Amino acid sequence: MFPARLTDYGAFSDASSSVGIAIIIGGQWRAWRLLPGWQSCNGEKDIQWAEAVGFELLTLTLTRGSAAGTNFRVFEDNWGVVEGWQNFRSRNTAVNNVFKHILDHLKSYGSIKCVYPSYIRSGDNPADAPSRAQYPN
């Protein structure tokens, strides 16, 4: 359920297990490479964890430049992250740890219910290319 007033800055995040994480806000992008060996042996730090970190980076960036009380719509191409955030929990412990970091940040921002992710297909996600080291000009 979305609030009546929702700000859409064209905010997208994505992760690629072979390269890294990218976010795009209003056509401006930022990308980070994942370090070799980033996936843990017990499988908790997997692509869903990387997608959740992208969601965290997007949330931190949006809230740091906005007035408290602003509600954001963001786009994510990982159902596990979208549904996990909507339910405030995931089956993945590492993803839950990322969600906890986000919630701690949002408490300091003034509202834990200000970020509303929507699912977008990978092929329609503009953050897909930079997460694979294909950077826009």
Image: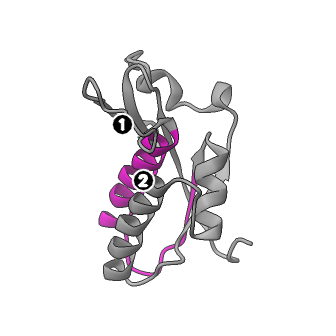
State the SS at label 1.
loop
The residue under the point 54% across, 30% down is 126
Looking at the rendering, in which quadrant would you find the N terminus? bottom right
State whether residue 127 is above or below residue 108. Answer: above
The residue to which callout 2 is attached is: 94
Q: Is residue 127 magenta?
A: no
Query: 10 Å neighbourhood of mark 1: few (<14), some, or many (≥20)?
Result: few
State whether residue 60 is above or below residue 107. Answer: above
- Pair 2/1: label in front: 1
The chief SS type of the magenta part is helix
Toward the front, the furthest residue is: 42
Q: Quadrant of residue 108?
A: bottom left
Q: Position of residue 20 (x, y in %)?
A: 37, 28
Tell me how many marks there are. Answer: 2
The residue under the point 37% across, 33% down is 39
Toward the right, the furthest residue is: 1
Q: Label for residue 40?
A: 1
Looking at the rendering, in which quadrant would you find the C terminus? top left
Q: Is residue 49 magenta?
A: yes
Q: Position of residue 44 (x, y in %)?
A: 45, 45
Foreground pick, 79 / 76: 79
Q: The disc labelled 1 sits on which kind of residue? A: Ser
Position of 90 with respect to 131 (left or right) is right
State whether residue 34 is above or below residue 19. Answer: below
Foreground pick, 80 / 131: 80
Q: Label for residue 16?
A: none
User: Real-space Cα distance between discs 2 and 1?
Assistant: 10 Å
Q: The disc labelled 2 sits on which kind of residue? A: Ala
Foreground pick, 35 / 113: 35
Instruction: Say which label, 2 or 1, has the lower sequence index.
Output: 1
Q: Range of the magenta residues?
A: 48-74
State the SS at label 2.
helix
